[in-house]
Image: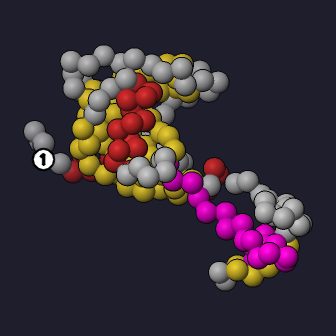
């Protein structure tokens, strides 16, 4: 999270003052409060041709892959945001299957809303400049990780196991 030291309105040094029941960086001159609210992020667990697509962002370690994520834009619904991110990063038009859940990612001060989405088999993946690689994993081989969007993968896998055959 970005910590403000000075008021963005008047440049006065911020002081830790009570606001909303907590000590928060506050301007003693004009009352500006840096609330430090988390940023809204959307995530997509993309199903394509029976597999789950995981992507590696530019500069990530070679073996690190994750689901598609991006910041929600102003005046955009979360559903539109998740479809836009998949289109931008993978070149795929997707339908939303279901909301997986909403997860706090404290390390980056984000709140991530994750969906299971499905792309038509006829479409081919076209990587954006933001990504270095994509890999397709059979759902039964997919493994969750213990933070951020990995929690959505965990929840999706758990729900999948509870579904009757053929669903």
Most common SS among magenta residues: loop
From this viewpoint, which residue is outermost toward the right?
13
Is residue 16 visible to the viewer in this orientation of the structure? no
**Looking at the figure, which quarter contains the N terminus?**
bottom right
Is residue 131 visible to the viewer in this orientation of the structure? yes
Using a 10 Å C-alpha cutoff, classify the residue at mark 1 as few (fewer than 14 neighbours), some (14 to 19) or many (20 or more): few
Residues 1 and 84: in front is 84
Look at the picture and state if 9 lies above or below 83: below
The residue shown at (67%, 83%) is 21
Instruction: Tell me where residue 132 sits by quadrant.
Output: top right
The residue shown at (70%, 80%) is 19
Q: Is residue 110 left or right of residue 161?
A: right
Q: Is residue 59 left or right of residue 155?
A: right
Q: Which residue is mark 1?
A: 164
Residues 16 and 64: in front is 16
Element type where label 1 sits in the image: loop
Q: Determine if the magenta segment contains residue 161.
A: no
Residue 59 spot, x, y in % from top left: 64, 24
Q: Which residues are magenta?
A: 23-41
The residue shown at (32%, 26%) is 92
């Amino acid at each position: 999270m970005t910590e403000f030291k000075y008021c963005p309105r008047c440049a006065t040094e911020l002081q830790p003052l009570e606001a909303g029941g907590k000590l928060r960086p506050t301007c003693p001159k004009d009352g500006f409060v840096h609330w430090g609210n988390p940023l809204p992020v959307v995530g997509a667990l993309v199903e394509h041709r029976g597999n789950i697509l995981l992507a590696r962002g530019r500069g990530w370690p070679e073996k690190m892959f994750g689901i598609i994520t991006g910041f929600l834009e102003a005046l955009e619904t979360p559903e539109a945001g998740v479809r836009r991110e998949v289109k931008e990063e993978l070149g795929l038009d997707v339908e939303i299957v279901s909301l997986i859940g909403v997860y706090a990612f404290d390390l980056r001060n984000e709140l991530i809303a994750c969906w299971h989405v499905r792309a038509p088999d006829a479409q081919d993946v076209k990587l954006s400049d933001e990504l270095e690689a994509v890999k397709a994993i059979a759902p039964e081989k997919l493994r969750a990780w213990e933070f951020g969007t990995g929690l959505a993968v965990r929840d999706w896998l758990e729900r999948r196991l509870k579904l009757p055959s053929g669903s």
